[in-house]
Amino acid sequence: MINAYGKAGHIEKTRKIFDYLQEKKLVSWNSMLSVYSHHGLLDEARIVFEEMPERDTISWNSMLAAYIQSGNLREALSLLERMPRKNLVSYNLILSALAAQGEVDDSHFLFKSMITDYLVTPGKQQYGCIISLFARGGYDRSCKELIDTMPFFPDTHDWTCLASANRIYKSNSLGMGHHNTRKTNAN
């Protein structure tokens, strides 16, 4: 019922139902947090998150989404560091936000960290996010290297990103233009 009222935009009714509950289970807390996050009510989401007697990965990811949606990327990164358990959703949220901001170094560092430090195996979506980011930033060699080493067959998105990077930056490092001299820590 909380989700239904929340999705319909009835925030006050949603909160009244939540407050009326005698015994609030984790799913109720997560629903309320999700409603506030979905509607961009960061302060309310933060209060619910802090008041939660227990949290699961859904709780943490909802709060990450709230920070990202409100443009608080640094808060989201800080929250990610404090998360006891991260999953692919956690990384999708952060990598997508970093990519949207053009944060090549931070994105690549986080991508490598999820593999080496947290032993999370990136999926096709995470690889695609980094490939797209490298391509948009003109890091064609890094883009090509990632395509060549990822444990998936490249799809049309991957090759389109690489071709676009070569066309836009007129790079010859892959035989299509002059060498991209942009310096990066992403290699």
Image (cartoon, rainbow, N blue to C red):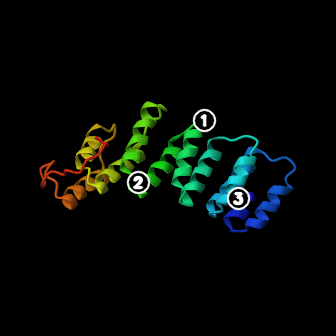
Q: Nearer the viewer, residue 96 or 150?
A: 96
Question: Which residue matches tag 1?
Answer: 84
Q: Earlier in the sequence, mark 3 or mark 2?
A: 3
Judging by the rendered image, the residue that carries numbered circle 2 is 99
Which disc is residue 173 wearing? Answer: none
- The quadrant the C terminus occupies is top left
Amino acid at pointer 1:
Pro
Q: Provide residue 116's location: percent of width, then percent of height.
A: 42, 31
Q: Position of residue 178 (x, y in %)?
A: 12, 54
Residue 60 picture quarter:
top right
* Whether label 1 touches label 2, CB < 8 Å: no
* Mark 1 or mark 2: whose residue is earlier in sequence: 1
Q: Is residue 147 visible from the viewing direction of this image?
A: yes
Question: Is 142 located above or below residue 113 in the figure?
Answer: below
Q: Amino acid at mark 2?
A: Ala
Kind of residue sitting beneath label 3: Glu
Whole-number angstrom distance, CA of label 3 to CA of label 2: 27 Å
Q: Tell me if mark 1 has few (under 14), some (14-19) or many (20+) residues whose alpha carbon lies within 10 angstroms of its own.
A: few
